[in-house]
Amino acid sequence: MAYLLYGKKAALAIDGGAVEEILSFVNKQGLKLEFAINTHSHHDHTSGTRELLIRSGAQYLENEILREKGFVELEEEKISVYHTPGHTKDSLCFHVGNILISGDTLFNGTVGNCFSGDLDGFLKSLKLLMGLPEETVVYAGHDYVRGSLTFARYLEPGNRDIDRFLKNYDPGHVRSSLGEELKVNPYLRFNTPEMIAVLRQRGLSVKTEEDRWRSLMSIE
């Protein structure tokens, strides 16, 4: 998914694969596309960036620069940049107001695959995001909601919050609050008594937080 953050005159594209839609919107709104950035370096998130830069004249902000600075400014409003290694080593999330654009680190109802192999780093990244206000609205890199919630129900068949989550699911506007994620996303529930019981029933380690997280990630 591509996202556009904008103010009165300027805009910033994140994972801008939807080139035509982005350019059409900024032109109709009389905006200048000032920056283009990516949540991580996987091709499905970067494939449209080059064309977008050529056609708009926007400035590309490198991953390393964003990590070092910790924010990007658009019309004097700071957009926080969080380095969230786990899915990839270079994964970033962007937070402004009550909006979190989480790339493939945190999906609605699940998390990304740990392609980096750094499970401990991934846990630290998720704990960082879990510390944000519960009203934070999560916009993720893909819509995996139905499959993710099927798996969540498989683990916790008695979790009624899953049905409530699915009832509010809108494929035309995919998002969730962090508070909702904490109730249904199994990969954020490693410290709950319900999930600890699930892991114990499967004979998986629950001794430490890290053990519980690794146990969850091992379930297929």
Image (cartoon, rainbow, N blue to C red):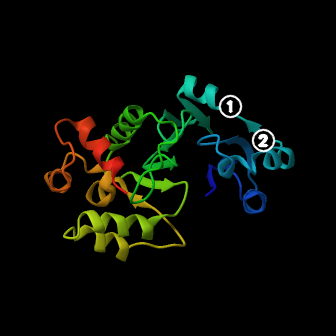
> Quick one: 178 or 98, which is closer to the camera?
178
Q: Is residue 193 visible?
A: yes
Disc tally is: 2
Quick one: label 2, few (<14), some, or many (20+) residues within 10 Å?
Answer: some
Residue 45: horizontal and vertical position, in percent?
Answer: 65, 49
The answer to whether residue 176 is left or right of residue 186 is right
> Quick one: 62 or 72, which is closer to the camera?
62
Give the residue at mark 1: 62
> Quick one: 175 or 151, which is closer to the camera?
151
Marks 2 & 1, CB-CB < 8 Å contact: no
Residue 200: horizontal and vertical position, in percent?
Answer: 15, 51
The answer to whether residue 194 is left or right of residue 127 is left
Residue 147: horizontal and vertical position, in percent?
Answer: 43, 68
Residue at the spot 71% in from the left edge and 55% down from the top edge? 17
The answer to whether residue 14 is left or right of residue 98 is right
Direction front: furthest residue = 203
The answer to whether residue 23 is left or right of residue 72 is right
- Cα separation between marks 2 and 1: 13 Å
Residue at the spot 60% in from the left edge and 34% down from the top edge? 73
Residue type pointed to by label 2: Ala
Report the mark closest to the observer, 2 or 1. 1
- In the picture, the disc for residue 58 is 2
Q: Considering the image in quadrants, where does the C terminus appear? A: bottom left
